[in-house]
């Protein structure tokens, strides 16, 4: 192709390591044109970030890079650091993944932006500062002149990412490289940031290299997609073509393993077995062959070349023709079974009016309390046998605090918690320790950190049983049973956690949670630290365990799409309050609370046509601090529905906190949906006329 | 910023007062001035000894509280730090010793920090290069050399150098030539010459920890995401390090300078002993040996003041380096 803005040809990147050279990128070629977005999709270790960093010369000096990277025909590889500095920032702007660490903590926001401007221009300090304020305004920061004087720690995550984008476009670059720009952000903020990136792209007319693992983000924002696996591009096509007719089993599996919160029915989620190969130990032949359900002997003989199968659609798979037109669940086995319906019986866990506050203190020697953080306020729910209950919310919504308050197995600060029908406030501590503790277990978010690296698997699994007073012989049989249960090989007993991959470690953590045969397993973000293709298999395992053992699962998650595929019932939390709760199907099909609607709307759909056609609700601002709760509805300040309401109702939103009620019951509909909503607009207060609330909570 | 520093300074003033008075009680408890008189011939009775100590406020028959009050009143009203058990006023011993030790410690600390931080910065940005490996080895070796050994080593080197050259190129003992030198400038030069070896000794034993911690701090900062962001805006690696990483990595160093001063003071005791300096370090040993309560307390007060000065300087440096302090 001619006239490409950035042209990468046969790029190889090799890092030295103690166990020999690691080939992170192996022969990658692509072009990016002005005004178009190429998405580089892949899981961790696929080489997508190394490719991007090679294109801006920001790889560590010990990396060996070969191939060609040219910008408007000028070769970039082999430039000196000084020559690179004329390209970076001026021709190429970069947006990094983690906005919390991407800004220098000791320099003001305006100073950092002004510096970035002055690197490539002769503007005076004052002129550069003016430009910095303009840039902040452009990326949507309110009151830019004042905020420019503030420091990064005074900005929230989403705001900092806006600043990083402003830094990237400060000198009107021709190419913007965005390396996982929204991965570290909450879903409603992610939607805002993606919009800002679109603004930046429109403003500069630049080409964009978007690096992500999220096929939903790709569907909405890319023009072309290149899928990377094990250091190579395995499939490349225009975005619509790729989603409509993927030709590589890996792409098919990726699309199938991304949960879709907007699907009309709960479609089965397909797991890709196994994990990506270690770069030090790649199999001969196609690197995906060990995980591929369509593998034939020829796949293992030689690594397939990237060949065109149709206009602009190239793929590295010898079975491409057989793959096109297939659906993920036809190719991949073990599709996730829909969870069984809950039966009415005595609840396993009942929470009533749970509250938790933290004091905010000031001063080092004489600590005095200056405020109270209301982390959890008046949370109530119950979970019946065989049910999976999910607490959903963005960071700071109090969902993890709720979970930990329950698992503490102590009388809560306010409210009551009943486990297996026993009130924690009245049950003697001894009985809690002996009986309830083993009935309630926890699996944490990050399996890397949750498992003691110095304990072999046997001890890891035996530890909770020893604490619960199991017999030594019983422990031994139970440990092998557990490994079998979570699908780990029985010979792993004497290995250490370091010998396992992320997905396997999470299986280990689950096995550890199951050791004492609990009735209730609490999981704090069980898959958010895992790669997409591995997530599906862990979710599958959970569903399987639940059906097999009749477990009750209490899951805390921020990812609505994940929740949709395992939950029977959901509670959506905002600022420590449950604002909507009900059966998962109903909640996803017809969300009532404006926040739930916005949250669902913010999740990108892994389908370019639907994603681009729909109207999204993008909330303004971010979740406020729980230190100063508003008097009325906690969501009132950001509510997209409130401006459309009658003045009387708007006032009520500001002054009176809405109670969690079933709107159908209130409006007298005979069939009760089981959904409870805390919203004045959805649940019109009885003293207000029906006309005032005529436009129900559906925009 | 000014209010911040003043607030800190008031805190330190309180700390000095508390530390000094606490030392008074500890010293009165542990040190017994009467033992200075016990070995004298003719043998004196306890009463005679106590009578002899009474004019210096050291009479053990009065309660420790009234002795303390008496001492405190003198210090506050007349800045009189009391007498030794043999009647030598502490005030007459202090000024020249403070001058001597002050210059030693000040120059030693400044040189240690400058040399250590400079080496740390230089080697961090050239990690695993030849210079880094050599200086690191050297620093680890020096870290393990006791002050006495390095001081004596320096003395031996200087003596053989002097003998080789045939004249006294480096003075190895005392703070100045006994009997003095005529003229102002020759006198200054003479003092500076005497200062060289002890300062080198304090620096050699002091710079190592600065080198190693600054290197580690900067290495952390070099790999920080914000340095990468800075480079992405078009700064070269060297510029990004200088403008973003270096400043951030200096903050912990600045904070810790204050708290190394007590350690330097201890190091100075040995250095002063080896090089025959009549400074606060040696005075500290002497006062303890001679059960001189008032002298020991004066040394403690000196140490507290030096630490406070170091801490306030460190606070000012922190504020200058980290503008966030000014905001909050």
Image (cartoon, rainbow, N blue to C red):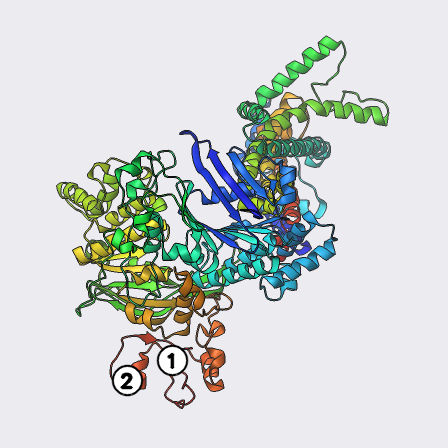
Does A452 appear above or below B194? below
Residue at mark 1: chain: A
Does B36 appear above or below B256? above
- Image check: A470 left or right of A40? left
Quarter that holds the C terminus of chain A: bottom left
- Image check: B286 left or right of B96? left
Residue placed most toward the observer, B45 or A328: A328
> Quarter-wise, where is residue B286 in the image?
top right
Give residue A200's position: percent from left, percent from top.
58, 59
- Image check: A275 left or right of B75? left
Residue placed most toward the observer, A387 or A297: A297
**Residue A377 tag number:** none
| Distance between mark 1 and mark 2 Cα atoms | 14 Å
| Dot 2: element | loop
* Residues beneath discs 1 and 2 located on the same chain: yes
> Quarter-wise, where is residue A84 in the image?
top right
| Dot 1: element | loop
> Quarter-wise, where is residue B185 in the image?
top right
**Is residue B285 visible to us here?**
no
Residue placed most toward the observer, A302 or A203: A302
Give residue B311's position: percent from left, percent from top.
62, 44
Most extreme residue toward the right, as rendered?
Answer: B183
Give residue A348's position: percent from left, percent from top.
21, 64
Residue at mark 2: chain: A
Kindly identify which residue carries mark 2: A669
Residue at the (49%, 45%) spot, across then down: A30
**Is residue A682 visible to us here?**
yes
Q: Residues within 10 Å of mark 2 (few under 14, many from 20)?
A: few
Kindly identify which residue carries mark 1: A682
Q: Residues within 10 Å of mark 1 (few under 14, many from 20)?
A: many
Give residue A215's position: percent from left, percent from top.
40, 55
The mark that comes first in sequence, 1 or 2, is: 2
């Amino acid at each position: 192709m001619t006239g490409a803005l950035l042209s990468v040809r046969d790029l190889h990147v090799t890092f030295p390591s103690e166990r020999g050279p690691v080939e992170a990128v192996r022969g990658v070629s692509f072009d990016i044109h002005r005004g178009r977005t190429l998405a580089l999709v892949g899981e961790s270790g696929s080489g997508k970030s190394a490719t991007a960093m090679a294109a801006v010369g920001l790889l560590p000096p010990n990396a060996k890079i070969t191939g060609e990277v040219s910008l408007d025909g000028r070769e970039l590889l082999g430039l000196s650091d000084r020559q690179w500095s004329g390209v970076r920032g001026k021709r190429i702007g970069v947006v990094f993944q983690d906005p919390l660490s991407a800004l220098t903590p000791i320099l003001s926001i305006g100073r950092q932006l002004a510096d970035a401007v002055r690197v490539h221009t002769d503007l005076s300090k004052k002129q550069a500062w003016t430009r910095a304020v303009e840039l902040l305004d452009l990326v949507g920061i309110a009151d830019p002149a004042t905020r420019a004087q503030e420091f990064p720690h005074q900005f929230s995550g989403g705001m900092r990412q806006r600043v990083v984008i402003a830094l990237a476009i400060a000198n009107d670059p021709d190419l913007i490289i965005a390396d996982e720009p929204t991965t570290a952000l909450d879903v409603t903020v992610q939607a805002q940031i993606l919009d800002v990136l679109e603004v930046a792209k429109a403003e500069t007319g630049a080409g964009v290299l978007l690096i992500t693992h999220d096929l939903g983000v790709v569907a909405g924002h890319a023009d072309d997609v290149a899928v990377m696996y094990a250091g190579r591009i395995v499939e490349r096509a225009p975005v619509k073509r790729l989603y409509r007719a993927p030709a590589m089993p890996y792409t098919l599996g990726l699309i199938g393993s991304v949960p879709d919160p907007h699907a009309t029915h709960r479609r089965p989620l397909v797991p890709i077995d196994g994990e990506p190969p270690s770069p030090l130990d790649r199999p001969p032949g196609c690197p995906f062959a060990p995980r591929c359900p369509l593998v034939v002997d020829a796949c293992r003989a030689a690594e397939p070349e990237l060949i065109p199968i149709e206009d602009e659609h190239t793929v590295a798979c010898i079975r491409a023709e057989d793959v096109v037109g297939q659906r993920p669940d036809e190719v991949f086995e073990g599709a996730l079974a829909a969870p069984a319906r809950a039966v009415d019986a005595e609840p396993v866990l009942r929470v009533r009016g749970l509250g938790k506050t933290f004091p905010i203190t000031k001063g080092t020697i004489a600590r005095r309390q200056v405020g109270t953080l209301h982390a959890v306020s008046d949370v109530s729910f119950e979970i019946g046998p065989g049910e999976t209950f999910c607490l959903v919310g963005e960071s700071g919504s109090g969902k993890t605090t709720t979970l930990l308050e329950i698992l503490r197995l102590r009388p809560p600060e306010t409210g009551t918690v009943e486990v297996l029908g026993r009130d924690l406030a009245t049950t003697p501590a001894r009985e809690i320790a002996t009986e309830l503790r083993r009935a309630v277990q926890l699996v944490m978010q990050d399996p890397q950190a949750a498992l003691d690296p110095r304990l072999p698997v046997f001890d890891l699994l035996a530890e909770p049983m020893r604490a619960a007073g199991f017999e030594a012989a019983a422990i031994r049989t139970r440990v092998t049973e557990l490994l079998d249960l979570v699908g780990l090989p029985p010979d792993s007993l004497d290995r250490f956690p370091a010998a396992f991959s992320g997905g396997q470690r999470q299986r280990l953590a689950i096995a550890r949670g199951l050791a004492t045969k609990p009735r209730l397993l609490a999981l704090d973000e069980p898959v958010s630290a895992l790669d997409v293709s591995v997530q599906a298999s862990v979710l599958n395992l959970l569903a399987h365990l639940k059906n097999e053992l009749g477990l009750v699962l209490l899951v805390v998650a921020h990812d609505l799409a994940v929740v949709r595929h395992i939950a029977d019932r959901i509670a959506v939390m905002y600022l420590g309050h449950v604002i909507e709760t009900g059966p998962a199907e109903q909640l996803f099909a017809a969300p009532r609370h404006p926040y739930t609607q916005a949250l669902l709307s913010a999740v990108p759909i892994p389908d370019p046509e639907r994603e681009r056609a729909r109207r999204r609700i993008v909330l303004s601002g971010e979740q406020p601090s729980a230190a100063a709760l508003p008097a009325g509805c906690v969501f009132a300040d950001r509510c997209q529905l409130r401006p459309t309401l009658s003045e009387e109702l708007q006032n009520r939103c500001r002054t009176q906190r809405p109670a969690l009620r079933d709107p159908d019951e209130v409006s007298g509909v005979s069939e009760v949906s089981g959904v409870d909503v805390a919203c004045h607009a959805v649940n019109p207060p009885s003293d207000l006329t029906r006309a005032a609330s005529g436009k129900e909570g559906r925009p | 910023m000014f209010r911040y520093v003043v607030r800190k300074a008031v805190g330190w003033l309180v700390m000095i007062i508390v530390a000094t008075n606490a030392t008074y009680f500890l010293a009165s408890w542990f040190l017994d001035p009467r033992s200075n008189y016990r070995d004298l011939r003719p043998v004196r009775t306890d009463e005679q000894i106590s009578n002899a100590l009474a004019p210096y406020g050291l009479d053990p028959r009065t309660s420790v509280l009234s002795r303390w009050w008496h001492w405190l009143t003198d210090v506050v009203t007349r800045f009189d730090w009391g007498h030794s058990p043999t009647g030598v006023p502490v005030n007459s011993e202090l000024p020249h010793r403070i001058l001597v030790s002050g210059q030693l410690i000040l120059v030693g600390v400044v040189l240690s920090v400058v040399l250590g931080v400079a080496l740390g910065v230089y080697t961090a940005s050239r990690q695993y290069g030849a210079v880094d490996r050599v200086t690191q080895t050297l620093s680890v070796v020096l870290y393990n050399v006791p002050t006495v050994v390095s001081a004596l080593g320096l003395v031996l080197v200087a003596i053989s150098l002097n003998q080789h050259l045939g004249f006294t190129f480096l003075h190895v003992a005392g703070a100045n030539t006994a009997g003095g030198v005529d003229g102002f400038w020759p006198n200054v030069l003479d003092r500076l010459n005497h200062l060289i070896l002890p300062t080198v000794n304090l620096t050699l034993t002091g710079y190592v920890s600065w080198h190693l911690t600054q290197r580690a701090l900067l290495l952390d900062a070099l790999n920080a995401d914000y340095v990468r962001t800075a480079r992405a805006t078009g700064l070269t690696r060297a510029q990004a390090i200088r403008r973003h990483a270096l400043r951030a990595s200096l903050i912990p160093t600045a904070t810790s300078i204050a708290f190394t001063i007590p350690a330097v003071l201890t190091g100075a005791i040995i250095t002063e002993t080896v090089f025959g300096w009549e400074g606060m370090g040696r005075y500290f040993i002497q006062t303890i040996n001679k059960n001189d309560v008032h002298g020991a307390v004066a040394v403690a007060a000196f140490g507290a003041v030096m630490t406070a000065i170091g801490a306030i300087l460190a606070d000012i440096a922190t504020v200058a380096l980290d503008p966030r302090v000014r905001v909050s």
